[in-house]
Amino acid sequence: MLAPLIHLCVAPERRILWRTLLAALLVVITWLALTPAPPATITTGWDKSNHALAFGTLAFCSAWAVWPRPRQWGWLVLALLAYGIGIEVAQSFLPPREADAMDVLADGVGIALGLAAAWPVAALARQRP
């Protein structure tokens, strides 16, 4: 029953799908983060949950696109946090935007949630013959 999900996430031939999705997410999230007035329709209603959702999705996609082994996820966390910090630095130069350290914290929460969602799939994939 879980075999199709595991195959979708970890099969080498699916990696191009995950990489394409990751690239699209990075473009959209960067645009939303750096545009002076992002569309009001693309929001959860709370800035911090927007960050957590975006970075959770990035973490989940990155796990299958680039770092499929949980041992490598430390690098994934560092890369995504650096991306989040880079966004905050860029926002500090873009009025009416401003940098907020709490946004980076929300990014970190999202990363943790995204990897927590990926962990069971990775564990099941390791158990497969």
Image (spheres, rainbow, N blue to C red):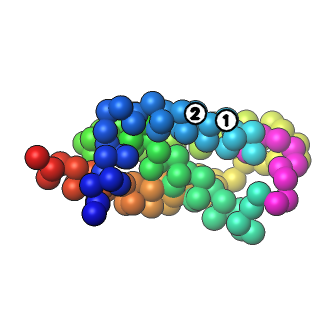
Residue to which mark 1 is pinned: 27
Q: Give the magenta-colored segment's residue range.
A: 33-41
Q: Of helix, strand and loop, which mostly describes the magenta segment?
A: loop
* Secondary structure under the numbered disc 1 in the rendered image: helix
Mark 1: few/some/many CA within 10 Å (<14, 14-19, 20+): few
Q: How many marks?
A: 2
Give the quadrant of the N terminus. Answer: bottom left
* Secondary structure under the numbered disc 2 in the rendered image: helix
Kindly identify the residue that appears in the image at 69 percent across and 53 percent down: 100
Q: CA distance from mark 2 to mark 1?
A: 6 Å
For the residue pair 6 and 87, the one nearer the viewer reads as: 6
Would you place residue 46 above or below residue 18 in this image? below
Disc 1 residue type (three-letter): Val
Q: Is residue 20 magenta?
A: no
For the residue pair 78 and 16, the one nearer the viewer reads as: 16
Residue to which mark 2 is pinned: 23
Q: Quadrant of residue 31?
A: top right
Would you place residue 97 above or below residue 72 in this image? below
Mark 2: few/some/many CA within 10 Å (<14, 14-19, 20+): some
Kindly identify the residue that appears in the image at 63 percent across and 56 percent down: 51
Q: Is residue 38 magenta?
A: yes
For the residue pair 129 and 106, the one nearer the viewer reads as: 129
Do tag 2 and tag 1 residues touch (Cβ < 8 Å)? yes
Disc 2 residue type (three-letter): Ala
